[in-house]
Image (tube, rainbow, N blue to C red):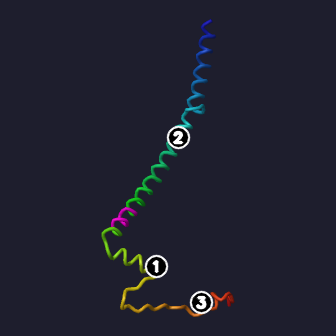
Amino acid sequence: MLRWIALALVALLIALQLKLWVGEGGMREVRLLRERVSAQQAENERLKQRNQALSAEVDDLKHGQQAVEARARAELGLVKPGETFYQVVEPGAAKKKDGDGK
């Protein structure tokens, strides 16, 4: 009788160990969740830095005339009154635009 109880306890111990290591909610799943949390924290940090840079840029555009002027020049090609605009064309660039491609 004692032998059967000991055998049942050993079988129960093995079953619990299997559930702990490979079952649902076991150590493998905990490890995977920790890896996902770590990756998400790294992504959150990257996005936080990006948000801070964007916030600084918005603040600069709201309060700094130079930033607005630089953006108007770069994105819209605007020039101030009295300035002369020069466009430098690389040799062969006109031929490529015409579709010749040579």
- Nearest to N terminus: mark 3 or mark 2: 2
Residue 78 image position (x, y, % from top left): 43, 83
Q: For mark 3, what is the residue?
A: 93
Left or right? Give the position of 102 relative to 88: right
In magenta segment, residue 31: no
Magenta extent: 54-59
Residue at left 39%, top 63%?
53
Q: Which mark is residue 31?
A: 2
Q: Which mark is residue 76?
A: 1
Left or right? Give the position of 2 relative to 86: right
Front residue of this view, candidates 54 and 5: 54
In the rendered picture of this protein, how many numbered marks are placed on residues? Answer: 3
Look at the numbered disc 3 and give the secondary structure of its residue: helix
- Nearest to N terminus: mark 2 or mark 1: 2
Please identify the dominant SS of the magenta region: helix
Residue at left 60%, top 33%?
22
Look at discs 1 and 3 and give the one toward the viewer. Answer: 1
The Cα atoms of the two marked residues, 2 and 1, are separated by 52 Å
In magenta segment, residue 57: yes
Specify the quadrant that holds the C terminus: bottom right
Amino acid bearing label 3:
Ala
Residue 60 image position (x, y, % from top left): 33, 68
Residue 55 image position (x, y, % from top left): 37, 62
The Cα atoms of the two marked residues, 1 and 3, are separated by 21 Å
Amino acid bearing label 1:
Leu
Vertically, is 76 above or below 45? below
